Image: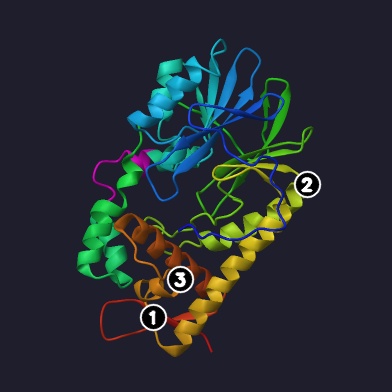
């Protein structure tokens, strides 16, 4: 789920984003375009990096006709005269990889991404029937969602994951520690976890520019979710670790080019804010679980007070479970047996 925060300590180099089909230059040879999304988070940022004879693309938007029109507008307008050379995908979420198959085929370019991103997209978005299979339903039911809500979430809440045009049949793997040369620049490849496994980020040390994907956003917190395929996973622990690592790996004054919202300066400040945000949420869960045993479903209103549609509920439920798993690993919560088949936790003594 996305939670807004105020960031008076951050600095924003531009006041307004580019309009759909237009670009803004964020540094010599690095262009920013914005593509609409049909969700509450209504846009994604994509970047184009000077690659000598043409432009390397970072991320795509979802696989729908409106996004195809935007890309045709970009390539026929502000990018005209120089071809797309390759596609770099930061992670497997459809707003980032959704148009990869179409874009690569249309322009005859290769796709570069992490192995986990490629395989996750193939498994989750492109596997028929996977999203409403019994393990997903059992996951929700076991953690307290009622049958009717489980039905809505399983059939409607995951629908956006199918908004993918397909994948190229092959890809070029990016691994943390690699150096990726794009035009006259060298980018260090970093990967982070929590929001998405092995999410790719790029850092150009010479220009102090950090392409952060969704790992660090200026005014919202990226979704951190447990999914049924890894029900005991600890994505929140991995995310907190990644944020602390970024503060060691990337200078505080780097220009951050994120996957959503506005580019900014203040990476270390924002990383610390995100860590503190999740600590506050853990404290709220601990208070609730001191009063009574709670399932993940019963904890959703503790963190999300507004009414949620199926799409939002799937994120909210899975994010609550991420906090529960994190606190279980730290010994702050403990499982408790009840009279039904629902799994609940209590605050540890």
> Mark 2: few, some, or many residues within 10 Å (few <14, many ≥20)?
some
Q: Main secondary structure of the magenta part?
A: loop
At which x and y percent is residue 266?
72, 51
Quadrant where the C terminus sits is: bottom right
Side of 252 relative to 68 (left or right): right
Residue 132 seen in render: no
Q: Residue at x 54, y 59 (%)?
A: 4
- For label 1, the residue is 294
Q: Can you tell which mark lies on residue 253? A: 2
Return the disc, 2 or 1, that comes first in the chain's sequence: 2
As drawn, 230 above or below 14 = below
**Rounded to the nearest whole Å, what is the CA distance between mark 3 and mark 1?**
13 Å
Q: Nearer the viewer, residue 306 or 123?
A: 306
Q: Can you tell which mark lies on residue 303? A: 3
Quadrant where the N terminus sits is: bottom left
Q: Nearer the viewer, residue 190 or 5?
A: 5
Residue numbers of the magenta segment: 122-132
Side of 115 relative to 169 (left or right): right
């Amino acid at each position: 789920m996305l939670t807004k925060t105020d960031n008076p300590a951050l600095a924003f180099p531009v006041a307004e984003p580019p309009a759909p089909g237009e670009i803004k230059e964020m540094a010599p040879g690095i262009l920013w375009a914005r593509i609409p999304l049909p969700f509450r988070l209504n846009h994604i940022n994509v970047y184009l990096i000077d690659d000598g004879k043409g432009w390397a693309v970072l991320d795509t938007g979802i696989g729908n006709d409106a996004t195809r029109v935007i890309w045709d507008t970009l390539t026929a307008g502000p990018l005209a005269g120089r071809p797309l050379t390759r596609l770099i995908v930061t992670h497997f979420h459809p707003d980032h990889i959704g148009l990869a198959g179409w874009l690569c085929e249309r322009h005859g370019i290769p796709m570069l991404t992490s192995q986990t991103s490629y395989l996750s997209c193939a498994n989750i978005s492109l596997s028929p029937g996977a999203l409403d299979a019994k393990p997903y339903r059992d996951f929700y039911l076991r953690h307290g969602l009622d049958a009717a809500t489980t039905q809505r979430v399983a059939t409607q809440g995951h629908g956006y994951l199918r908004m993918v045009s397909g994948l190229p049949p092959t890809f070029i793997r990016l691994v943390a520690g690699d150096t990726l040369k794009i035009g006259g620049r060298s980018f260090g490849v970093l990967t982070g976890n929590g929001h998405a496994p092995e999410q790719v980020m790029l850092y150009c040390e010479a220009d102090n520019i950090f392409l952060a994907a969704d790992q660090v956003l200026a005014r919202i917190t990226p979704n951190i979710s447990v999914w049924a395929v890894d029900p005991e996973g600890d994505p929140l622990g991995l995310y907190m670790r990644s944020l602390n690592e970024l503060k060691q790996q990337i200078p505080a004054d780097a220009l951050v080019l994120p996957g959503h919202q506005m580019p900014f300066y203040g990476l270390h400040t924002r990383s610390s804010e995100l860590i503190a945000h999740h600590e506050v949420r853990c404290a709220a869960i601990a208070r609730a679980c001191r009063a009574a045993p709670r399932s993940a479903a019963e904890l959703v209103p503790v963190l999300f007070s507004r009414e949620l549609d199926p799409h939002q509920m799937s994120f909210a439920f899975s994010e609550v479970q991420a906090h529960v798993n994190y606190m279980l690993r730290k010994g702050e919560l403990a499982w408790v047996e009840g009279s039904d088949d629902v799994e609940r936790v209590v605050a540890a003594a």
